[in-house]
Every structure is written in C-alpha cells, then in structure tokens.
Image: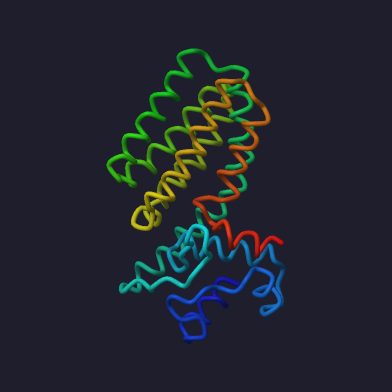
Amino acid sequence: MVEAVLARMKSGELPVGSRLPSERDLAAEHGVSRNAVREALAVLQLSGHVETRLGDGSYVAAPSPVEDRASNSLVAGAGIAESLQAREALELASALMAMRKATRSDLLKVDAIIAEMEEHLEHDDFKAYLRATLDLHLAIASASRTPLLVELVTELTEKHRADQWVLHERYTPEIGAYSMDVHRALAQAIRNKDVAAVYEATCRHYEEYPVLKADAHSKDVQG
C-alpha cells in the first residue's frame, strides 16, 4: 500500500501540496482494508512524504532532494510505525504498574524529565525534546518496578530512538505543544493514581502519534 500511494505521488496523480483522499476512499480505490490504508499513511507521515496540518488534513509533502535520504526515511518511518502498537500495550502496562509501585524518588525523576521537556520546547529544540520524551517513557517503565517490562520497553524505545531522526525536521511548535500536553497528562495521571486518565493519555499518545491525524480530517476518515 505504501508503494501504491508513492507511485501515485511520483506519477503526478497526487501532486505536491494536494490533499489526500479519505481513508475510506483510498481503501476503495486500492481494494484494501482501511486498516491497511491507515498503516500505510502512518509510514508516509512518519517518513515525511505526507504532511499533516492540524485541524485541516493530510497533504503530499515535497520530496527529499536526496534519493538515499528519502529511501532511508521510509525505512525509519516503517520501523517507528511497526512498533507503535507494541509500545502502546507495553507502556500502558508500565504506567499502570508505576501508578501502583512508583516511589517518591521515581515520581521526582518523572517530574524532572517533564520540566526538561518543557524547557526544550521553549527553545524550539525539537531534537532534544524528542529524546527527552523517550527518556520519560523509560523512567515510567523503571517506576513500574517490573524488570521484564523495563527490559521490553527499553528494547523498543532504543529501536525507536535510532529511527527518530525522521521526525526532528518536521516537528513544529504546534505538534510539540500537543505532545507536551499528552505527556504531562500521563505523568499527572500516574501521580494521581487515576486509571482512567492513564488509559486516556496513553491512547491519545499512540493513536495520534506524532499527531498522525488532524482534527478535522480525522472526523472524515473515521466516520
């Protein structure tokens, strides 16, 4: 499905700047499920081939002038997209266990990383901000006091860290503010021992990572 959409972009059928059809329409046009379309769009968005404009929709982005970079970005984007569901499940478990087992020291470490993330955003240092978000998830896993969860979360997080370069240049203050709000809510939910809030924050994080859908367009594609 990724190759099919890329082919339409390269042929000019979907030119740079054009808005992508809805998931429903793409699924019908290509004879695949909407889930297959959703996964393909996630890869294309993560790799920079598609740009999501908050509150508007998803558009074809200008291609990278360097062919190798474009190819590498697809590989990295696919790597991130493939890990999202596993990360969501593991990190939800980590957060719920941290809610029960975190010590005062654990919570102070989480608070310190949240403060660091806020500082990076104030300086529009998205590269440092994104590194800090991964550090936060590792700190939450550590706070779960569950060795196997720590091991699994660490493995996926470090794999993600290796591919995260594809996000740095395309991050914006708007996306950063949204991401900060989600991470802050997760940390606060753990501190408050609020199961529903932990679940909501984790789902928001991974279902829209890294803001893979825009508000107006998401209503169209999920209706």
Residue located 39% across and 69% down the image: 70
Residue located 49% across and 51% down the image: 210
Residue 63, quarter of the rendered image: bottom left
Residue lying farthest to the top in this orientation: 104
Residue 29 is situated, as x and y percent measured from the top left of the image, at 67, 80
Give the colour scheme shown. Answer: rainbow
Residue located 58% across and 23% down the image: 98
Residue 135 is situated, as x and y percent measured from the top left of the image, at 42, 34
Of the 4 image quadrants, the one containing the C terminus is bottom right
From the viewer's side, name the closer residue of 141 and 57. Answer: 57
In this rendering, would 123 be left or right of 12? Answer: left
Q: Is residue 15 above or below residue 197?
A: below
Q: How many marks?
A: 0
Q: Is residue 109 above or below residue 60?
A: above
In this rendering, would 20 be left or right of 34? Answer: left
Q: Is residue 127 above or below residue 54?
A: above
Residue located 52% across and 13% down the image: 103
Residue 88 is situated, as x and y percent measured from the top left of the image, at 60, 42
Of the 4 image quadrants, the one containing the N terminus is bottom right
Residue lying farthest to the left in this orientation: 123
Residue 72 is situated, as x and y percent measured from the top left of the image, at 40, 64
